[in-house]
Amino acid sequence: MKIAHVVRQYHPSVGGMEDVVANLVKYQNEQTQYQPTVITLDRLFRNSADKLPKNEVVEGIPVIRLPYSGSSRYPICLSVFSLMKDFDVIHVHGVDFFYDFLALTKFIHKKKIIASTHGGFFHTPYAAGLKKVFFNTVTGITSALYDKVVACSDNDFAIFSQIAAAPRLVLVENGVNVEKFENVALGHAQSQIVYFGRWSVNKGLPELIELIAQLQKIKPEFSLVIAGRPYDVDAQKLNDLVSQNGLTNIQIIESPSNEQLKSIIASSSYFACLSHHEGFGLAAIEAMSAGLIPILSAIPPFEKIQRESQLGFILKDKAEVKEQINSLAQFISSDKSEVIQQKEKAAEFAKQYSWTNVAKKYMELYE
C-alpha cells in the first residue's frame, strides 16, 4: 500500500507535527506491506528564502518538496494534486490549504483520504474570530469529505466534534518517541529546570522566564535552560528578556545537537512549558520519558497528563502570581529521595505512548 503523508513542514524543520510524521513513516517503512512517502513544501517558514531539494531520501523515507505561494499561515500549493495518482491512501497532517484542497478535489483524484488534526489552527489568538468562522464553515465542509478525521488528543476530539461525528471522527492520541531520551535523567535530583522544543509564540517562553525570575527570589539555587530552534521567537528576544529581569542563571541554547540536548536533560530534574495551546503535549511526554517532572500551564492536554500521571505541577491561569510562586517553590522543595522517585514514576508513565501501539491503530484505519 502506497501512502502519501502530506504535511506543510518537514525535515529539516523541527516541531511536534514533524516529529509525529517522522515517527509514523519510520514505523510504516519497517512493515513490508507499506510504502510511505512524505510530501511537503520546499521552503521552511522561518527561512523562506532558501529552497530545499525537490527530491530527497531522509532516514530511508522518500521526501518530495513542492513550491508554494501566499502566507505561511495558509500556503497555496496546487501542484500537490498531480502527485495523488501515485498513491493508495492520502494522509493529511494539520488543518491548512492541503486539508481543504485535497478534500475538495477528492471527486477528481478519487483517493481515500485521512486527516490528523494536530491541534487544528488554534495555536495562537491571532485572528481568533475569523478562525472560528472559517472552522465552522469551510473546515466543516471539507471535513465531511474525509474518510476519517483523526483527532490527536481529547482536546482536538472535543473541538472537531462540533463539525464531524463518529464514525468519521475517531480518537488516536499521538505516539511519542519515548526511546529518544529514555531514562537519561534518572538517578539524581538536580536544581535545574529545562524547556526544550520549538521557540514559537504559543509556547509561552516570555512567561516562563518571568516565572523563573520570581521563583529564583525564593529558590536562588534553581536554574533554567531554554533549548530549541527559533521559529517566530529568536534567541535575541529571549536573551533580552533574561537581561531585563537581571538574571544570570538562565541559559538560552539555540539549535542544540541531540547529544547536547541529552546532556542538558540529564543534568535536570524538571521540564517546564507554559504553552497557550497544544494539540497533544508531545514535548511533555518526551520529557517525562527521560525522567523529568513536568511544570505545565493550565491547558486541557497538560491537565490531562497531570491528572492521569498524578505527577507534576499545573500553573493555574487565574491564581494569584505570588500564591502560585509560593506553591511552586513548595512543590520543588521535596527531599532528594522523593524527587528521584517522582522521576522514576514519570519515566514509567511515558512508556504507554510508544509509537508501536499508535502506529498499529493507523494501519487499521488504512486497511
Image: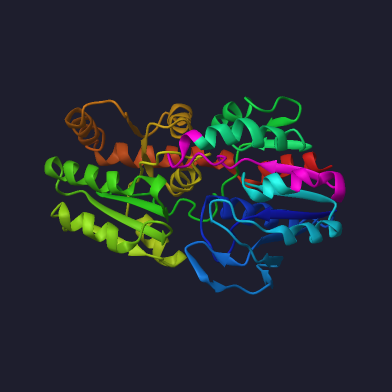
Q: How many marks?
A: 0
Asked if residue 119 is among those painted magenta in the image, a careful observer would answer yes
Residue 15 drawn at (x, y percent): 51, 54
- Residue 351 sits inside the magenta stretch: no
Res 110 visible: no
Please indicate whether residue 222 sits to the left or right of residue 93 in the image: left
Give the quarter of the image for residue 366: top right
Query: On screen, 95 above or below 23?
Result: above
Query: Which quarter of the rendered picture does the C terminus lie within?
Result: top right
Residue drawn at (57%, 40%) of the image: 120
Residue at 46% across, 30% down: 300
348 and 116: which one is in front? 116
Image spot of residue 21 (x, y percent): 64, 53
Q: Is residue 294 visible?
A: yes
Residue interval drawn in magenta = 102-129
Viewer-nearest residue: 277 or 106: 106
Location of residue 44 by image quarter: bottom right
Where does the image place residue 212, in percent across and percent down from the top left?
A: 22, 45
